[in-house]
């Protein structure tokens, strides 16, 4: 069963390859969605797929790439669906 979640990631997450690394991780987990920078310095991640894959991505978001310093990850269920199997960086 597919579901979607939206996560807002805070800390040093812009300019450290966070979005690209998130895309790679999501593609490995066969999730669709996107990662995009927000004007306030956070990264927004919308991911859709199986429950186990979403949980794995949420755990990974706390780590991020080597140069990231994640201070907070807030996730919630998202109403919208992203189809097509792609994970984009916006």
Image: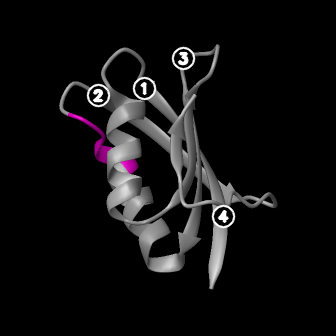
Q: Earlier in the sequence, mark 4 or mark 2?
A: 4
Q: What is the spatial separation of the Cα atoms under label 3 and label 2, in whole angstroms?
A: 12 Å
Would you name the residue on which mark 3 appears?
A: 41
Q: Earlier in the sequence, mark 3 or mark 1?
A: 1
Q: Secondary structure at mark 1?
A: strand
Callout 2–callout 1 Cβ contact below 8 Å: yes
**Relative to the observer, which residue lies in front, 4 or 33?**
33
In the image, 53: left or right of 1?
left
- Residue 10 is situated, as x and y percent measured from the top left of the image, at 49, 30
31 in the magenta segment: no
Question: Disc 4 vs disc 2: which is toward the camera?
Answer: 4
Callout 4–callout 2 Cβ contact below 8 Å: no
In the image, 15: left or right of 80?
left
Identified at 64% across, 59% down, the residue is 5
Q: Is residue 72 above or below residue 76?
A: above
Q: What is the spatial separation of the Cα atoms under label 3 and label 1, in whole angstroms?
A: 8 Å
- Residue 58 is situated, as x and y percent measured from the top left of the image, at 44, 58
The quadrant where residue 90 appears: top right
Q: Earlier in the sequence, mark 3 or mark 2?
A: 3
Q: Secondary structure at mark 4?
A: strand
Would you name the residue on which mark 4 appears?
A: 4
Would you name the residue on which mark 1 appears?
A: 11
Crowd band around label 4 with a 10 angstrom C-alpha radius: few (<14), some (14–19), many (20+): many
Q: Earlier in the sequence, mark 4 or mark 3?
A: 4
Q: Is residue 15 above or below residue 66?
A: above
Segment colored magenta? 61-65
């Amino acid at each position: 069963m597919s579901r979607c979640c939206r996560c807002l990631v805070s800390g040093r997450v812009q300019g450290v390859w966070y979005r690209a690394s998130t895309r790679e991780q999501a593609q490995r987990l066969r999730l669709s969605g996107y990662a995009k920078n927000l004007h306030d310095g956070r990264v927004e991640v919308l991911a859709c797929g199986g429950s186990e894959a979403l949980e794995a991505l949420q755990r990974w978001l706390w780590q991020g790439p080597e140069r990231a310093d994640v201070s907070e990850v807030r996730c919630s269920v998202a109403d919208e669906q992203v189809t097509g199997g792609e994970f984009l960086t916006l």
